[in-house]
Amino acid sequence: MIRLGWGSCVFAVGALVAMSGCNDGVAQCRDGCPTGTRCDEATGLCVRRPTSSDAGFVDDAGSVVDAGSQTDSGVVPLDGGEPVDAGRLDGGAPDGGERDGGADGGQLVDAGSVVDAGSVVDAGSVVDAGSVVDAGSVVDAGSVVDAGSVVDAGSVCLRPTFRTLTIPSVGGPIGVAAGDVTGDTLPDLVVANHFDGGVSILTGRDGGAFTFWGFRSTGQKPYFVRLADLDGDGRLDAVVPNQDDNTVTVLSSPGDAGVWSRAANHPVGAGPVSVTIGPLNQDPWPDVLVSNLTGGSATLLVTDGGAGRLVPAGSIAIGVEPHGAAIADFTGDGRPDLAFAHFAEGVVRLAPGLAGGGYGMALVLPVGPAPRAIIAGDFNGDGPMDLLTADYFTQGLSALFGGADGGFLPATVISVGSGPAALLHADVNGDGRADVVVANANDDSISLLIASSSGTLGPAIAVPVGDTPFGLASSDFDRDGRPDLVVSNFGSNDLTVLLRTGCSP
């Protein structure tokens, strides 16, 4: 049974009974059909509405009556970063909260919050990925993990299921973003390669497969990637913080010069590990907020009037080891405020935006140990903005629920997997409400927190991925109308693509 519709006309294929008096399909949709009938747009005939006595009847709620069970086999029922206990970022194992005494010069290894639904891009010359992925070959590796039959009957999905693909990567995939970078309307993947000094672009193919497309150089030890159209030309640009040379690289595509043919490096503070895109002033252009882990500061880069250039707008000495940031109006005064997660201190600092520009004295909000990532949103459905932090030395998130007066309640713990290191705020089950995805670096999984109709988050559902998941992104990779996920696994040097297949009962 297939339910179709154009405008206000809806009919069920296989249950059509011709009626008289429907001459022009479009006109009948406008003028209406007799009671108990529908207008068939394809034939221009009024047809009897199917009833529950018809085999395969589809009711208005989308439930199938007497049509047998509809199941998807070979799907993974959901269960439930940055680097954790898997080797240092300079070649050994990233050591969660301890300082790295290797090439990183004592910097804390951390990836900041991964709140990205766009792809990552870079500029520079195209370099063949060589031994890992041959240019031009379709990367569609990875077996389907069977979880039994899955039912998706049109109701709200509380346990999404996925088909899993594993894509080999290169150079320590520490961050990932998704978006149409190559201009073919299909979502692509951009991967920040920590050891290779640049980003890889994997172009999307039909069915959710990917082909290696090219490489763009950035700087030393790229740690994160974020996509946004900074210059207003309708094409995605990439913003990449380079941890070891204290710069941020912006990759853009001027004119007809090609994808990310221009790379501009901007000096920032010491040890940049994450970037947040959002409004830092009153113009309509997106700006960039950089968290400098080693320097204990944040660098503000604002877009120069849509000219495609980022210009420095100062820095803030925000506190010890900021590991990620969120931009939102937390106080309700119409001005953007800044919230930073401080890994070494176990606190969030919230700097309110001032009427004359700049930011006021920060409010200190205790959270769990070692917050590595932070995102903003209304996570309890009451209207005011809230904050979530991924507390790396725990198995939980800290939820700071905002009040109408601009303040916050004491932190509430939400249980997830071990070593939560990255966060993504995106619709996972396709109901139009943003859910929360957590990368758990210590137990090689992600956790899904599905938002209810009231806006509250449900219990964590664990889904296995690769070793030491670092980065998260979401898009509809196989073009089936359902949101999919991608995870960058630093420890296993690969990507896990989770293609949504249905819903577990």
Image: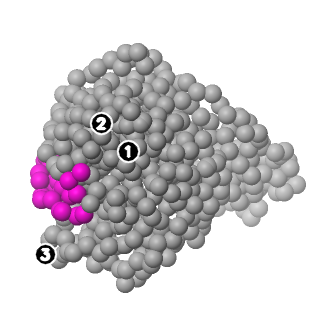
- Along the viewing direction, whichever of 11 and 288 lies nearer the viewer: 288
**Is the residue marked by circle 2 packed among few (<14), some (14-19), or many (20+) residues within 10 Å?**
few
Q: Which mark's residue is nearer the viewer, 2 or 3?
A: 2
Q: How is the image coloured?
A: one colour
Query: In this view of the protein, can residue 427 be seen by the observer?
Result: no
Residue linked to disc 1: 118
Q: Is residue 132 left or right of residue 323?
A: right
Name the residue rendered at 49%, 23% in the picture: 139
Task: Indicate which disc residue 356 carries.
Answer: 3
Q: Is residue 2 left or right of residue 386?
A: right
Residue linked to disc 2: 102
Which element carries disc 1, helix, strand or loop?
A: loop
Count of marks placed on residues: 3
Q: Is residue 362 above or below residue 81?
A: below
- Answer with mark 2 or mark 3, whichever residue precedes in sequence: 2
The picture places residue 393, in percent across and down from the top left corner, at: 47, 55
Q: Amino acid at mark 1?
A: Gly
* Cα–Cα span, label 1 and label 3: 32 Å
**Is the residue marked by circle 3 packed among few (<14), some (14-19), or many (20+) residues within 10 Å?**
few
Based on the displayed image, in which of its 4 quarters is residue 233 positioned? top left
Which element carries disc 2, helix, strand or loop?
A: loop
Q: Amino acid at mark 2?
A: Gly
